[in-house]
Amino acid sequence: MLKTFALEEFAPVPEERGPLAAPPAGALDAAAQARLDRLYEALKRRAAHMLGYPTNFDFDYRELERFFAFSMNNVGDPFEDTLYSVNTHEFEREAIDFFAQLYHIQKPNYWGYVTQGGTEGNMYGLYLAREVCPNGVVYFSEDTHYSVMKIVHVLNLKHIVVRSQKNGEMDYGDFADMLRLNRDKPVIALANIGTTMKGAVDDLGKIRQALHDNAIHHSYIHCDAALFGMTLPFIKDAPAFDFAAGADSIAVSGHKFIGMPTPSGVVIAKRHNVERVKAAIEYIGASDTTIAGSRNGLSSLMLWRAIQALGRKGFEAQVKACLNMADYALARLAEIGWPAWVNPYSNIVVLDRPPREIIRKWQLAVKDDFAHLIMMPHVSKAKIDAFMRDLRRVCPAPEPMPRRSAA
């Protein structure tokens, strides 16, 4: 009979460097080191002029540098033990719990994981929707992020693009019309919780009303909350997009409002839907219910650290500051007569498209005849003032103009 041992009975493995171990730090030659130095300085200059993309540079994870010594792979289901135990599943679960509470779904009704970003989160939500609603048709507005079109092709999902209103929000009349034309098919509705260019929020109440009015009984609602999933929950009277409001899954980005050095995100879904795609994988000793399989354990640790450091009150203060900064930018643009507007509850200032040199220097996202500024926690009045000086220098406006609304 084989003798069994407790883990404590095994002798510790001595640390040693094998012939294939990585060389010690500082082994780069002078030319390679010089390239890194130039890149670092270039990135510092570029980061100082970031106004057009929803990334937050106001973060500091230096206390986590010691964890670079480990290959932390969060393979498998974060709610199960795996044979690959050099992971941060415990911290990933705590981060997921935070978002679940934020989106009003209680244990044990939810499941989630830390993704590589909003696109993976949206893919996961639509993947579940396909399993819940076989032969379903995906409906999303023309202001939806470009990645969704890729996702419906990858998942081989039939889809209908719904018209948008002028402010970027879904046209609910057109949505209802499309439902009437396809009443025999299950409905998969993708709601934008902050559109990419205009910061519009699709109304889950109106989406659900259209489903009810057309007697659609087999449906699934996924919320792309990459942009506003970390702002709206901290704004009084903001539109509800959570599970209590009718969502079946929600994707949010981690590197946007929270701020991280690498892209990340979180997807939260109803547990009973996730059970449909669960598969046991023997050689990791756990189930895999994710898309990526191997996942970045450091991302979970950074999300956990940000949540612990800021908490709800800290995030609420940041959101308030960003909305105030949007008002400030809008006022400064009005001073020089540059047409601009902001959707309700949004930190995205939409403005008429400036000249190319302004777009390039300040890294502004543009579409057709407009661009936008995004007020993230790293954006200060000084940064807005510097942008305004550049804009006025290139395109002086003779007379102030009133603020323009999206209506």
Image (cartoon, grey):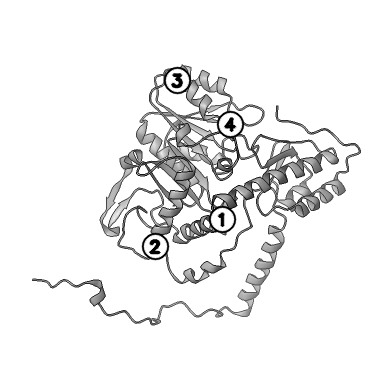
Q: Amino acid at mark 4?
A: Glu
The answer for how far apart the CA atoms under marks 3 and 2 are is 45 Å
Q: Secondary structure at mark 2?
A: loop
Q: What residue would you read off at disc 1?
A: 310
Residue drawn at x 48%, y 69% as measured from the top left: 68
Q: Which mark is residue 212?
A: 3
Q: What residue would you read off at disc 2?
A: 87
- Asked whether, in this view, residue 163 is left or right of residue 361, the answer is left
Q: Position of residue 346 (x, y in %)?
A: 65, 39
The answer for how far apart the CA atoms under marks 4 and 1 are is 35 Å
The crowding category of the residue bearing disc 2, from other C-alpha atoms within 10 Å (few below 14, some 14 to 19, many at least 20), is: many
Verify CB contact (< 8 Å) between mark 4 and mark 3. no
User: Which quadrant: the N terminus?
Assistant: bottom left
The answer for how far apart the CA atoms under marks 4 and 3 are is 23 Å
- Asked whether, in this view, residue 362 is left or right of residue 197, the answer is right
- Asked whether, in this view, residue 368 is left or right of residue 107, the answer is right
- Mark closest to the chain's N terminus, 1 or 3: 3
- Mark closest to the chain's N terminus, 4 or 2: 2
Q: Position of residue 386 (x, y in %)?
A: 80, 53
In front of the other: 51 or 10: 10
- Mark closest to the chain's N terminus, 4 or 1: 4
Residue drawn at x 71%, y 58% as measured from the top left: 48
